[in-house]
Image: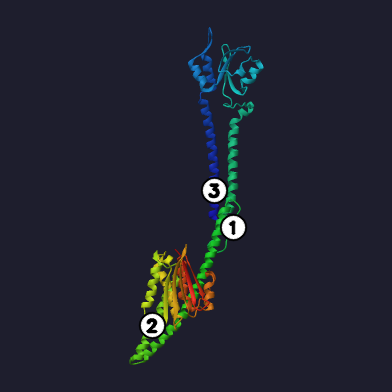
Amino acid sequence: MKGMIKIFVRYVGSAAAITLVLLALNIALLFFWLAEMQQEDGYAYRISRIADGLQKQEDGYVLSEAAQEAMNARYEWAMLLNDQGDILWSRHLPKALFKNYTVPEVASFTRWYLQDYPVYVWRHADGLLVMGCPKGSIWKMGMELPQNVMDKTLLWIPFGLAINGIAAVLLALLLGWRLFRSLRLLADGIERMAEKQRVELPKKGVLGDLAMQLNETSRQLQRQEADLQKRDYARTAWIAGVSHDIRTPLSMAMGYASQLEENSELPLSVREQVGIVRKQSERIKTLVNDLNLASKLEYDMQPIRKKGVPLAALLRSVCADFLNGGLCEHHIIDLAISEAAQNARILGDEELLRRSVANLIQNSVQHNPKGCAIWVALDKNLSYCEVVVSDNGIGFSEEFLKQMKKREEEKAHIPSRGLGLTIVRQIAKVHGGTADFTNLPEGGCEVRLRLPC
């Protein structure tokens, strides 16, 4: 609150100071303008030069060259009237003005206008010199003030300045108080946001736009907090699922290890048990790697090294690795690449994409120990490439399909079988694609990876 009061005091002081500075600046500009107007060659001086330059000769009046320059600088026409109002001499006089002027007419236009022409007059030796300016060029206004008002001018000016200063301070206080109230609400909202509380500030007032942005920021923070909590829950679910995956192979490895510890000799049967321990240990290692990869992908910690990846070559390489890696003769892998997808490339992480396809093939092999046919296909559409891995095996369980179809923020525990396939979905997601898991009507399952070209 002390900080808010300090802001309020500084704001009011700054506003009052700025107002007073502007007031003083305007007064200075007014005096400067008046001084400039006084310094300018005024009409009296110019018309006196013209009057002096208008000389009478035998055949009429002649205007000197200097007087002509003075006239051209400001006036449009001129005429000289005698005491009876007759025109003795004229220059560029409009036709409408050729006439005799009475004393009332002369009196009426002397200070103002003659047929909308601003006019100025000067006493000449032979009469009255009248100078006319262009229409609309001069704005003439008469002002009269009582002498006592002029006598008190020196008193009224400081008094007016004082009134202006007081009004400026009062306005600054009013505006400052309004700003202070708005800032206090914003400060309270920020404090509640720091305490992870929901903020809903009124959107009216001077800082309504800022309050609206703080409200939106609060909603985003609340959503992020909820997402973090869901991620924590998902991480716990992952750990529970992986623990379930690890429990059986680890128990087998420990059981055979115990038997090895109890045997004093290593016959053929023992060596077979050692081989089983090795295979189960490798399985545990694979599961742990899957867990690490899934966690990194889930929390955006896995570095993605994207480059142009030719999908056809990648699929051929993955299938060849399985066929050359001692695949059981009961498992058959068939690869089909459409003509449109022969040169298809996507921007992605080659190792992650390879891992996703390998996981799909390994899933079909692992869960169909008696053998099955595995089909891998690649096709290209206008906007995406589609990788399809299917088999004629036992298919997915209903529980697994339900879990995979749930939206990510609603997903619960994924069965032990789903870790490798969940990694497939995560890899598709980080590449801007999707992964769809379905069972085929004739038996078996199918996974479609759609990746943007």
**389 displayed left or right of 267:** right
Q: Mark number for residue 11?
A: 3
Seen at 63% across and 17% down, the residue is 106
Q: Is residue 394 above or below residue 380?
A: below
Type of amino acid under label 3: Tyr
Camera-side mark, 3 or 2:
2
The answer to which image quadrant residue 271 occupies is bottom left
* Element carrying mark 1: loop
Find numbered disc 3 in the image and state the secondary structure of the residue it sits on. helix
Check contact, mark 3 vs mark 2: CB within 8 A. Answer: no
User: As drawn, is 269 to the left or to the right of 421?
Assistant: left
Q: Is residue 137 above or below residue 82?
A: below
Cα–Cα span, label 3 and label 2: 76 Å
Q: Earlier in the sequence, mark 3 or mark 2?
A: 3
**Which quadrant: the N terminus?**
bottom right
Q: Which residue is mark 2?
A: 279
Residue 375 left/right relative to 213: left
Around disc 3, counting alpha carbons within 10 Å, would you say few (fewer than 14), some (14 to 19), or many (20 or more)?
Answer: some
Question: Which mark is nearer the camera, 3 or 1?
Answer: 1
Comes first in the chain, label 3 or label 1: 3
Q: Earlier in the sequence, mark 1 or mark 2?
A: 1
Where is residue 15 shown, x and y percent of the image? 55, 45
Disc 2 residue type?
A: Lys
Which percent across, then down, holds residue 266? 33, 91
**Outermost residue, right direction?**
104
At a point 60% along the width and 18% down the height, the residue shown is 95
Of the numbered discs in the image, which one, if any, rests on residue 201? 1
Residue displayed at 39% across by 89% down: 258
Q: Nearer the viewer, residue 40 or 112?
A: 112
**Mark 2, residues whose alpha carbon is within 10 Å: few (<14), some, or many (≥20)?**
some
Quadrant where the C terminus is found in the figure: bottom left
